[in-house]
Image (tube, rainbow, N blue to C red):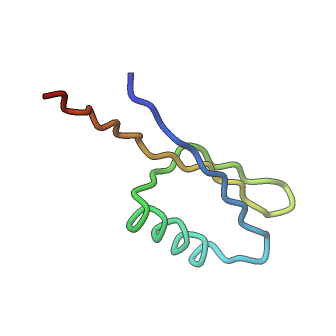
Amino acid sequence: MPEYEFVNVYVPRGVSRKEAARLLTDHAEYGHWELDRLSLHTDGSRRVRLRRRIIRQVRATW
């Protein structure tokens, strides 16, 4: 079962859809994050949860 780390991003209501998409694209490209959950609230703000896989390095024992 893969392990993930999560980060929550809050996007206020004044941010346009295009700017929000650019912000999430930057997180995906440079931080290797992927979209886990997006909540659109009635006031227009967005709460986004991003995840990325934790890759464990197995220590060589020689």
Q: Where is residue 54 in the image (x, y as percent from the top left)?
A: 41, 40
Residue drawn at x 54%, y 43% as measured from the top left: 36
Q: Is residue 17 above or below residue 51?
A: below
Residue located farthest toward the front when viewing the structure as drawn: 62
Q: Where is residue 21 in the image (x, y as percent from the top left)?
A: 53, 69
Residue located farthest toward the top when viewing the structure as drawn: 1
Q: Seen in the image, is 40 located left or right of residue 19?
A: right
Residue located farthest toward the right when viewing the structure as drawn: 43
**Residue 19 or 9: which is nearer the viewer?**
9
Residue drawn at x 43%, y 62% as measured from the top left: 31
Q: Is residue 47 above or below residue 13?
A: above
Residue drawn at x 60%, y 44% as measured from the top left: 37
Name the quadrant of the C terminus: top left
Q: Using the rendered view, name the quadrant where residue 58 is placed.
A: top left
Q: In this view, does 62 lie above or below 44?
A: above
Q: Seen in the image, is 49 located left or right of residue 62?
A: right
**Residue 56 or 27: which is nearer the viewer?**
56
Q: Using the rendered view, name the quadrant where residue 10 is placed.
A: bottom right
Q: Seen in the image, is 10 located left or right of residue 33?
A: right
Q: Position of residue 16 (x, y in %)?
A: 67, 77
Q: Using the rendered view, name the quadrant where residue 43 is placed.
A: bottom right
Name the quadrant of the N terminus: top left
Q: Where is residue 50 in the image (x, y as percent from the top left)?
A: 55, 50
Q: In this view, does 44 lie above or below 14?
A: above
Residue drawn at x 71%, y 66% as measured from the top left: 11
Figure disc tally: 0
**Residue 60 or 2: which is nearer the viewer?**
60
